[in-house]
Image: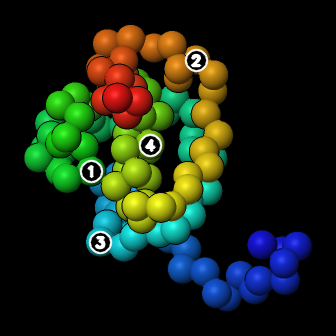
């Protein structure tokens, strides 16, 4: 954004746990660019199975690896013709268990 001379004052930036306390839950975006913290821990609270961001997948990302929860959260907030750019470790593509279930849902 600096290259295109866009002022930081035009952004609505929050420093918080975006999964537990999202400030943008009801907003839709044309573009989402994110470099989330790799394989971080999160609560994986069963309450998220009733949350629209995660409920369709039938599984939650494990407590020890939040990567797919971030992806699910981003997809939920993406417009139908929007684009997500996300940087994740390559191992995300090969994990099994609940992450494998979520990945299969995403590519079907």
Q: How far apart are the alpha carbons under marks 1 and 2? A: 23 Å
For marks 3 and 2 on the same chain, the one whose residue lies earlier in the sequence: 3
Residue 53's place in the image compared with 21, above or below, is: above
- Per the image, the residue denoted by label 3 is 26
Q: Quadrant of residue 36?
A: top right
For marks 1 and 2 on the same chain, the one whose residue lies earlier in the sequence: 1
Mark 4 touching mark 3, by CB under 8 A? no
Q: How far apart are the alpha carbons under marks 3 and 1? A: 11 Å
- Per the image, the residue denoted by label 2 is 91
Image color mode:
rainbow
Residue 32's place in the image compared with 2, above or below, is: above
Q: Position of residue 66 (x, y in %)?
A: 42, 34
Residue at the location (34% across, 55% down)? Answer: 76
Mark 4 touching mark 1, by CB under 8 A? no
Residue at the location (37% across, 33% down)? Answer: 106
For marks 4 and 3 on the same chain, the one whose residue lies earlier in the sequence: 3
Q: How far apart are the alpha carbons under marks 3 and 2? A: 31 Å
Q: How crowded is mark 3: few (under 14 residues within 10 Å), some or many (20 or more)?
A: few
Q: Where is residue 85 in the image (x, y as percent from the top left)?
A: 62, 49
Asked whether, in this view, residue 106 is left or right of residue 54, the answer is right
Label 4: state its secondary structure: helix
- Per the image, the residue denoted by label 4 is 71
Label 1: state its secondary structure: loop
Q: In which quarter of the image is residue 86?
A: top right
Residue 20's place in the image compared with 57, above or below, is: below
Mark 3 touching mark 2, by CB under 8 A? no
Q: Where is residue 46 in the image (x, y as percent from the top left)?
A: 14, 36
Q: How far apart are the alpha carbons under marks 4 and 3? A: 16 Å
- Per the image, the residue denoted by label 1 is 53
For marks 3 and 1 on the same chain, the one whose residue lies earlier in the sequence: 3
Q: How crowded is mark 1: few (under 14 residues within 10 Å), some or many (20 or more)?
A: many
């Amino acid at each position: 954004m600096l290259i295109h001379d866009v002022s930081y004052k035009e952004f609505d930036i929050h420093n918080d746990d975006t999964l537990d306390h999202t400030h943008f839950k009801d907003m839709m975006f044309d573009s989402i660019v994110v470099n989330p913290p790799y394989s971080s821990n999160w609560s994986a609270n069963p309450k998220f199975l009733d949350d629209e961001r995660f409920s369709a997948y039938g599984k939650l990302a494990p407590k020890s690896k939040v990567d797919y929860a971030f992806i699910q959260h981003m997809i939920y907030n993406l417009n139908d013709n929007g684009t997500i750019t996300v940087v994740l470790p390559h191992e995300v593509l090969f994990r099994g268990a609940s992450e494998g279930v979520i990945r299969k849902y995403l590519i079907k």
